[in-house]
Amino acid sequence: MSEALFRPLTARDSLQPAWNDGRSTASVAADFVKPTRGLSSVQRLEIYARSYWFRVLDCLYDDYPGVRAILGRRRFMKLATAFLAQFPSASFSLRNLGSRLPRFIQDHPAFSTPHSALVADMARFEWAQVVAFDGPSLPTLTQDDVLDAGPTRLRVALQPHITLLDCAYPVDEFVLALKKTALRTEASNALTAMPTSRASARPRLPRPSRTCVVVHRQANNLYFKRLDPEACSLLTALRDGRTLSAACAAALRHADPAIDWASRVQDWFRVWQSLGWFCRRSTRGRT
Amino acid sequence: MPANPFNNHTDYGIGIGLRVPHYRHILEKKPVVDWFEIISENFMVDAGRPLEVLDRILEQYRVVQHGVSMYFGSADKPNREHLKRLKTLVKRTNTPWLSDHLCWGSVDGRYTHDLLPMPYTFAVARHTAAKIREIRDFVEVPICVENVSSYAEFHQSEMTEWEFLSEVVEMADCGILLDVNNIYVSSKNHGFDPYAYLNNVPHHRVGQLHIAGHTKFKKYILDTHDHPVLDPVWQLYAHAIRQCGHTATLLEWDDRIPSFDEVHHEALKATQFLGDQTARPVGTADPIGKADPIRKAQPVAA
């Protein structure tokens, strides 16, 4: 039964007529599903297949409104169907269903051409919002944590719900122009139709422009904040485990020497610390 | 048979499902509601707004957890990460009992996120009961299993659905969340007498009831939870109350969700049936369910 469900539906939202081994799907269904007076075995199976696909497509439809707006509904559904055929849900929660979509888009640019780079950026940006919405929070770094180690020894971690993005497009501006739908429901009711278009007219697609943005959570509200490229590099280096001094050196290697980076970095840290972005680095597995 | 071991000896009245469109109304207006049912999976997260809302609800209301993905009937072993998160949530909500569905929905680590029907065989019943026991031992709270709406039956089945449900809950020694709307939907889809179902489940194990709306199509009925409860379901509900006595009751409304007041108003229609429980002692059920007086659901003042 599960094999029947996981196979994509036809364009008419029906089960594919042929089974994997060449038999008809109708005869395979008749082997294990009882017919009724009004419905054949395959028609009964089809009710479940439709419900499965409508539900999972609806979930991606809600989680990726930006990708959907760029591609349009028809191409988005094609992308989502191909993705789900390769990566069916591997989690008890629908929350995680789209976690691998950004990577899939990157690996299969044909689904999003000629906007592949924009769609890839948008998918990363939208998944980051899922992470920021309910991802874990750890105790923030205290003044003592900072004072106990000098810059050459201090290593910090970013809150796990924070995602740093270095994008080729201003995806944040594009998303602000779209209406983000609310939380999906996840209950035991059946769905009767494919998701339908809920978005209004699509804003104009953005032109390429390097955009460093951090997606984070503050007082349980979602935010995205633009960063200077140097700030993004610094946070990335810290996230990757470099010490504070090594991260600064790496981030400012090509920076304009005319700028007072010392005071600018101080200002950044003041803001980041006040936003609670830093937490202690796990020492597990480290010497 | 109000409070019993399967609802942790707790006598609850009429509850409604906690749904996102109602959060603001509930938190601001603080309406009088006996209890809320939450979908466990929506709150099995690490942090953020869902848990903040839940904590605020818990300050004011009693909450019962209802799951949609434990899949007692799946061949897979229970997912440890899932169980740990569930237990963490149980400790947070202090739910008096926990419910999930008598179905399967995952295979080899792939999840359908649907409530799929099971072949009603003794072997499957044994497997399912063992899994329920294992999960209950882990989460340390009574479990009620819910009958699902179904649209397919299997040649392999050796018994009726109600016999299968009875077999499972007796072997697992667990409770039943009896969804009378699901009984009605399945009875129409498979052509059985819903009163025969109601009359032949172990009533002393029923810890909770579900009511909901459904959608009629030309050749089958779908359990959509997007309508008020229809009259035939109210009639079944009345019969269930006569069989089981005052039982915690929950209205499910999950799609095309109207205002909080409308949902609450619909749920409170159940009051007239709960109030009219000239309930028989357990084991002396009305053998002719259809003899119940047919009642029209009347609005009840909130």
Image (cartoon, rainbow, N blue to C red):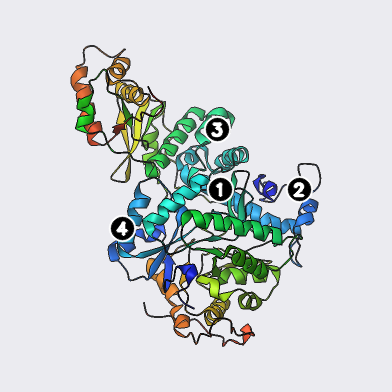
The correct choice, above or below, for A156 with respect to B43 in the image is above
Along the line of sight, which residue is nearer the eye, B161 or A248? B161
Q: Which circle marks residue A56 in the picture? A: 1
Marks 2/4: CA–CA distance: 51 Å
Label 4, residues with CA under 10 Å away: few <14, some 14-19, many ≥20: few
Residue B56: assigned label: 4
**Tag 1: Cα neighbours inside 10 Å, few (<14), some, or many (≥20)?**
many
Q: Amino acid at mark 4?
A: Arg
Identify the residue under disc 3: A104
Residue A94 appears left or right of A51: left
Position in image of residue A14 (x %, y %): 69, 51
- Dots 2, 4 in contact, CB < 8 A: no
Same chain letter for marks 2 and 1: yes
Q: Of the two numbered discs 3 and 1 on the same chain, state the one appearing first in sequence.
A: 1
| B155 vs A75, nearest the viewer | B155
- In this rendering, the count of numbered labels is 4
Q: First in sequence: mark 2 or mark 3?
A: 2
Up-down: is A253 above or below B256? above
Secondary structure of residue under mark 3: helix
Q: Residue at x 59, y 63 (%)?
A: B148
Q: Which residue is mark 2?
A: A17
Please, which chain is the residue tagged with disc 2 on?
A
